[in-house]
Image (cartoon, coloured by chain):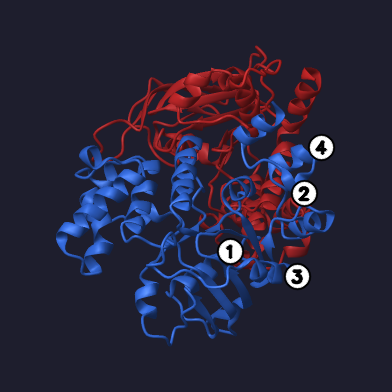
Chain colours: A blue, B red
Amino acid sequence: MSGFQAVAGALPGAPGGPDAPGAAGMSLACGHVSFSYEEARAPIPAVRDVSFELRAGGSLALMGASGSGKSTLLQVVRGLDAPESGAVLLDGAAPTDAGYAALQREVGLVFQAPELQLFASTARDDVAFGPRRLGWPEERVTSAVDTALDVVGLPPARFAERHPYALSGGEQRRLALAGVLAMRPRLLLLDEPFVSLDPGTRRQLVEILHRLKAAGVTLLLATHDVDLAWALCDELLVLGEGRLVAAGPWDFSPDGGRLLAANRLREPFFVELWRRLGRDPQRAPRNAAEAAEALS
Amino acid sequence: MSPSPDESAPLFDISGLHYRYAGAQADALADLDLEVHEGEFVAVLGANGSGKSTLARLLGGLDRPTAARRALACGHDLLAGDGRMAARRDVGVLFQNPENQLVAQCVEDDVAFGLENLAWPATDIGRRVDEMLARFGLEALRLREPHMLSGGQKQRTALAGVIAVPRRVLVLDEPTAMLDPAGRDEVLHAVREMRAEGLAIVYITQEMDEAVGADRVVALERGTEAYTGDAGGLFTDASLVRRLGLGVPAAGELALALGKRGHGLPGLPLTMDELLDALGAAT
């Protein structure tokens, strides 16, 4: 649990608001959040007393064994499920504060296999669905849709009028992401976005997420893929049976390694490589290009 | 490594296979040839939408090919209804999401399900289920409800159920996609054991490192075969890899990145150990 203090200590004094210069991202803090699913016999706690903070513009990998509560936590942060106890603070604002609902609308959640939820008859209408529901004027909707399609590599001139079902699986995944990005989220939650994607599409998605990160968007990424988590995220949060096991900077000390193994995880490839080359695993490269630079 | 020129007929003998979904403009599989021999481990790669999962369904006799010059699975004609029924007994198919495959109230019932459908005597079923639970390390979980298991445990349960029925060949469709790293290792270990016992396996994956060491890699592009050969031959062809929407294992990625910086390694390492050897040789 010591990692939690490490995250809190790393936080800047005051999270930047939406209009703060250079602060595109939204800060997130969960305080003692619990949530259970109602079952016939007894409630099964899915998230238990989870507390952590994520600074505006930060990136946090949410990891843990299957069934450890990652998806549930994302849904609670998004506000789709209200926590039974505890609170989700967005930019420091509590659910009872004025303006909280507006902040919630700036949290985007990309579900697992989001392409299953495509429904409109053109790519444009699918992406426009969210912005229209926000009541934006049509001009703003159009520009938001065009931008979002461009960001995910589906240029509107070629793709806007296509039927979503006529797109490939990888294109559908990116279209679903565009639907979330069109609402200009300042905090983006992604639930296993890489599962079943081919390597080419995975590379494109990693690049998109790097660009969003560079633009200051805060990222909370639930994934089993330790290599991509390490490539993309500054910090790590591990859930085990709904409880927070660790949160904070990546830790590849022997203790950190044991913690990963105990939670059915492993070290990223380049971290293992650095260890086996006798280098400091804590300073391991995040990707092949960085590794090549360091070895050249 | 290559299929021995034995007299036995291939387990899959597919030629000119076509499949088109109802209402689709184009074939999902077009003029596909595939031969898989006894004991072979064939990795099938391809971008999203290249036809891999469609192929898995057809090989398992779960769908009728739209057309084929020849479509035999363990000698059964996949173009005929009774041939497909017979193929379903000999060909075990495992899908990427174990949720879709687990049907019973507890693990042992799930493993027994296929055998009960074949009306095996109860004592034989009991013995076979015990054997499967032991083999996949599921003894302690035999009375647990499948939906309460971890992803790796679910997938091992599904695999045990598929294997419980004696099979001649397995078709595994991204069996590790939903799993955490430990669950992935558990399933890969089980697959390696089955391979060591000589079961033929068609292994569909998006994880490039899982294709390393296959007897043969087949890469699909828009429903047709774009490459067949060993993994090294595919991964060293950078333009083909890019065109097919594939990648190379992390070890190879690093070697290629070093090459771009003028520090090429001998050969293209595809595993951590090969990479360490190559780096050692280069310094």
- In front of the other: B54 or A274: A274
Q: Nearer the viewer, residue B212 or B15?
A: B212
Q: Report the Cα–Cα distance between label 4 and label 1.
A: 45 Å
3 or 2: mark nearer the eye: 3
Question: x, y percentage for residue B47?
Answer: 45, 34
- Residue A293: tell me if it is visible: yes
Residue type beneath disc 3: Ser
Disc 3: host chain: A
Residue wearing tag 3: A2
| Identity, as a three-letter code, of the amino acid under mark 4 | Arg
Identify the residue under disc 2: B135
Q: Are marks 3 and 1 in contact (CB under 8 Å)?
A: no
Q: Residues within 10 Å of mark 4 (few under 14, many from 20)?
A: some
Question: Which residue matches tag 1?
Answer: B104
Query: Which mark sits nearer the N-terminus, 1 or 2?
Result: 1
On the question of residue A126 being in view, the answer is: no
Extreme-front residue of the structure? A21
The answer for how far apart the CA atoms under marks 3 and 4 are is 27 Å
